Amino acid sequence: MDVDLYEGRIALLSRHGPPLRGYVTTDLDQGAYTLTVDRARKVWLIHEVVKPGLRFTIDLDGPDPFELDYEQPIVLTAHEGMPSAANADSMLEIIANLNELSEVAIWNYLTNLSDIMLYDTLDQLWTGETYGQAIIMKLLSSFESAVRALDDVHGLARVLRAIESFSAKPAQLYVDAFDSYLVDPDSREPDPEREKQNLSTWQLRLIYSKMVPVRSLVLYTDDILDTSGADPDPPVYGPANLLYPKWLTKATTPRLAEAKRVTLERLAYENIIAIIEQSVDAFEKIQMAWTIYGLAQPLAGGLLKLKSRPDKWAGSVGAARDPNAPWRWKGIQPAKGGPGRWVRDSEGGANMSHGSAWYQLEAAGAPPGWGYRCGGVQFENFINGMLIDAKDWAYWGTVGRSMRGISGPTAAMTKIRQAEAQLNVARKAGVGVEWRVSSQELVPVIRQGLEHHGLSEIKVVYAPARKMPAGWTPKTPIRIE
């Protein structure tokens, strides 16, 4: 609760939307108090010691205050208010002051108002003459300037939330209402803490370019759950002044769930270096957007509680059931030593089809969910002085068609950029690169394309795909050495 003692106004603040406003009768002094509500007797119980006979009654512009749900105990902040000069209306004085200030100065002025005065002032602007709405629109467009000029992000966010309670509909502020998304460049950075928890480093950057101010939000793909659970409670305000359900699921955020699915599916066929390069180009266009990383409590706490526990018997075909046992496989063995090191795939192998995981294992000896990383670039193995990359590309697949000129060049050029990155790290390490390709017909096509782009140092060999055993499921071993 936020009370202006001079105006006799009160605002009941909520995490779900705009506050409920009304009038209060009280002889409380300014300060902070804690209250509980006695619905049966319809009285407010103040925890602090106050003078006897205290009156405290609320008359809201809407529902009966005793029929509302409150987070107990209720915190009440009473402000002295702003007595006006010459008995003039203090609200009119505030509006007059705003007309004399620059946009950044208006932001600073509004951050110093109490919550009830802030909402009352914006209400006066929004419902008044057209100049009032014009001021609000200018404020929205100058938010980034205010952020750079004023060292008060929290205060500015509070004012922005108040403004958008008038200027935007809840559906526009819902986290699932993003306009576009991309893989965030930070996804390629290792995160030991997340690796210890078997969590992904893949991050989606969501862009809300139709909003003013423009904003972007970064979420780990782990935060988007592969469940269909609904949220019985209304969404709450969170990072970037967006509205969030308790959990991000297929039911609550279907567009987010689809973005995760498409991204992981794409990552199954393309190297992260190429994807990141594309994302960096797009990121440069929105780097000035008001950006928030990750999710804040209580949302993140709810998400973590829903995460499924890791498989007690993590392993794969031929792996021992003992989680402390090393990787066991009768085929090509993972390298011991070399210029790189074995690291857990950030998605634990969940970002590719079973067929692709089987081909990497059978043709290159890469255990499911693991990669051989050298210079920040991931390969499948290191064999006979060569960094190995397994390419399970079909002749009539997306990449094959692109390389043969039947479809657009995007997929083919993505692989060329990947090859450039791989060859760069191999040269620095003084080793070679070998691509093992499952389609014999594509081998000469790939060689010709690499040669055309000055990448003929990469060795391209045909490694036929042996049939995947019926019922085989890739499961990530705990350790491989």
Image (cartoon, helix red, strand yellow):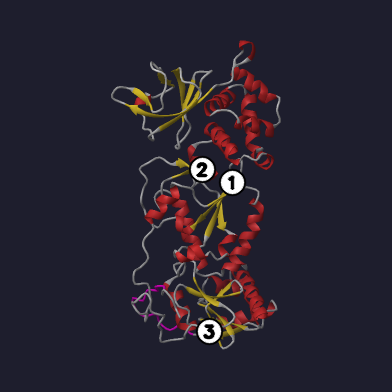
Residue 24 percent coordinates (x, y) = 45, 19
Q: Report the residue that reaches farthest toward the bottom.
A: 384
Please tell me the numbered disc located at residue 242: 2
Residue at label 1?
215
On the rendered structure, is 58 left or right of 146?
A: left
Determine crowd level at label 3: few under 14, some 14-19, many 20+ residues with C-alpha closer than 10 A.
some
Determine crowd level at label 1: few under 14, some 14-19, many 20+ residues with C-alpha closer than 10 A.
many
430 to 141, vertically: above or below? below
294 to 166, vertically: above or below? below
Residue 445 on the magenta span: no
Which tag is nearer the camera, tag 3 or tag 2? Answer: 2
**Mark 3 to mark 2 CA distance (whole Å):** 51 Å
Circle 2: element type:
loop
For the point 61% across and 44% down, the residue is: 214
Q: Nearer the viewer, residue 275 or 242?
A: 242
Residue 135's image quarter? top right
For the point 38% across and 24% down, the residue is: 63
For the point 45% across and 55% down, the residue is: 223
Earlier residue among tags 2 and 1: 1
Main SS class of the magenta portion in the image:
loop
**Mark 1 to mark 3 CA distance (whole Å):** 47 Å
Q: Can residue 144 be spotted in the picture?
A: yes
Which tag is nearer the camera, tag 1 or tag 3? Answer: 1
Residue at label 3?
440
For the point 41% across and 75% down, the residue is: 477
Residue 472 on the magenta span: yes
Residue 388 percent coordinates (x, y) = 55, 81
Residue segment shown in magenta: 464-476
Circle 3: element type:
loop
Residue type at numbered disc 1: Arg
**Mark 2 to mark 1 CA distance (whole Å):** 10 Å
Residue type at numbered disc 3: Gln
